[in-house]
Image: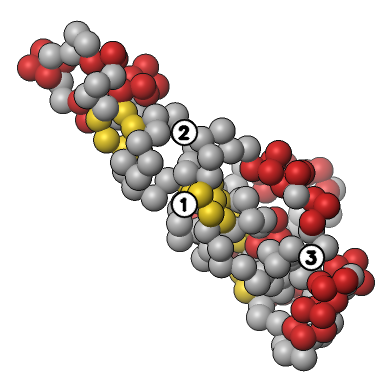
């Protein structure tokens, strides 16, 4: 039977969307994109990007490294930094906001070629976290490149008896025992956020 639903307001639709399962949400969104060019354009603008980066640099991060502070301290160098982001429009022409100084030369060079269209949100191959290509700085991916191992010299294990309390590894994700583990790649405590930093990479 045909449905006799009257037009729903934006608030009602948004509320219904928030209660959808992921599978049903994908189904509805796909149907909307296929049914409407306007919907296709709106969604494409949110999930497809032409942002391009020209750095593949990985740096060591100090134990007290703060990505936000590091970004601020280097903000004055952004105009000449080779890690700068270049935004281009649908025709591959760099946007005016991004063009200045040496950045202009790189942008003009890029404009000769059609920009690579890619998914805006992807999973980083280094940290396995989802990231946004349009918000991906040289300090975005702070990570360790090895596993946590037991620090048998830690005082956390002073009274630990594996026969009674269980294997050390059973507590590897327990915050109470965080000081009893360290990162094998850098020998820093398990609470350390990372020893390597770079842009996210898909």
Q: Is residue 144 above or below residue 50?
A: above
Along the viewing direction, whichever of 87 and 159 lies nearer the viewer? 159
Along the viewing direction, whichever of 96 and 30 lies nearer the viewer? 96
Q: Dot 3 lies on which element?
A: loop
**For marks 2 and 1 on the same chain, the one whose residue lies earlier in the sequence:** 1
Q: Residue at x 85, y 76 (%)?
A: 104
Specify whether residue 38 is in view: no
Q: Name the disc covering residue 127, or none.
A: 1
Along the viewing direction, whichever of 150 and 128 lies nearer the viewer? 150
Category of crowding for the residue at label 1, using alpha-carbon neighbours closer than 10 angstroms: few (below 14), some (14–19), many (at least 20): some
* Residue labelled with disc 3: 80
Residue 171 spot, x, y in % from top left: 27, 25
Along the viewing direction, whichever of 90 and 61 lies nearer the viewer? 61
Distance between the Cα atoms at labels 2 and 1? 14 Å
Task: Name the front one of labels 1 and 3.
Answer: 3
Q: Residue at x 62, y 68 (%)?
A: 55
Q: Dot 2 lies on which element?
A: loop
Category of crowding for the residue at label 2, using alpha-carbon neighbours closer than 10 angstroms: few (below 14), some (14–19), many (at least 20): some
Q: Quadrant of the N terminus?
A: bottom right
Task: Name the front one of labels 3 and 2.
Answer: 3
Residue 30 spot, x, y in % from top left: 63, 68
- Quarter of the image where one finds residue 132: bottom right
Q: Dot 1 lies on which element?
A: loop
- Quarter of the image where one finds residue 120: bottom right
**For marks 1 and 3 on the same chain, the one whose residue lies earlier in the sequence:** 3
Q: Residue at x 66, y 69 (%)?
A: 53
**For marks 3 and 2 on the same chain, the one whose residue lies earlier in the sequence:** 3
- Quarter of the image where one finds residue 134: bottom right
- Taking the view exactly as shown, the residue that stands out farthest to the left is 163
Category of crowding for the residue at label 3, using alpha-carbon neighbours closer than 10 angstroms: few (below 14), some (14–19), many (at least 20): few
* Residue labelled with disc 2: 192
């Amino acid at each position: 039977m045909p449905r006799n639903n009257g037009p729903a307001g934006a608030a009602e639709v948004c509320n219904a969307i928030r209660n959808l399962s992921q599978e049903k949400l994908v189904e509805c969104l796909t149907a909307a994109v296929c049914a409407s060019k306007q919907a296709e354009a709106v969604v494409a603008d949110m999930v497809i990007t032409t942002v391009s980066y020209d750095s593949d640099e990985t740096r060591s991060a100090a134990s007290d490294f703060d990505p936000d502070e590091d970004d601020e301290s280097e903000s004055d160098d952004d105009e000449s930094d080779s890690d700068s982001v270049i935004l281009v429009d649908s025709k591959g022409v760099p946007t005016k906001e991004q063009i200045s100084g040496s950045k202009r030369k790189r942008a003009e060079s890029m404009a000769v070629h059609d920009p690579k269209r890619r998914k805006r949100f992807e999973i980083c191959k280094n940290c396995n976290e989802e990231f946004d290509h349009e918000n991906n700085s040289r300090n975005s991916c702070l990570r360790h490149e090895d596993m946590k191992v037991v620090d048998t010299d830690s005082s956390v294990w002073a009274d630990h008896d594996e026969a009674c309390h269980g294997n050390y590894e059973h507590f590897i994700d327990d915050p109470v025992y965080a000081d009893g583990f360290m990162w094998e790649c850098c020998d820093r405590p398990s609470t350390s956020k990372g020893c390597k930093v770079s842009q996210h990479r898909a």
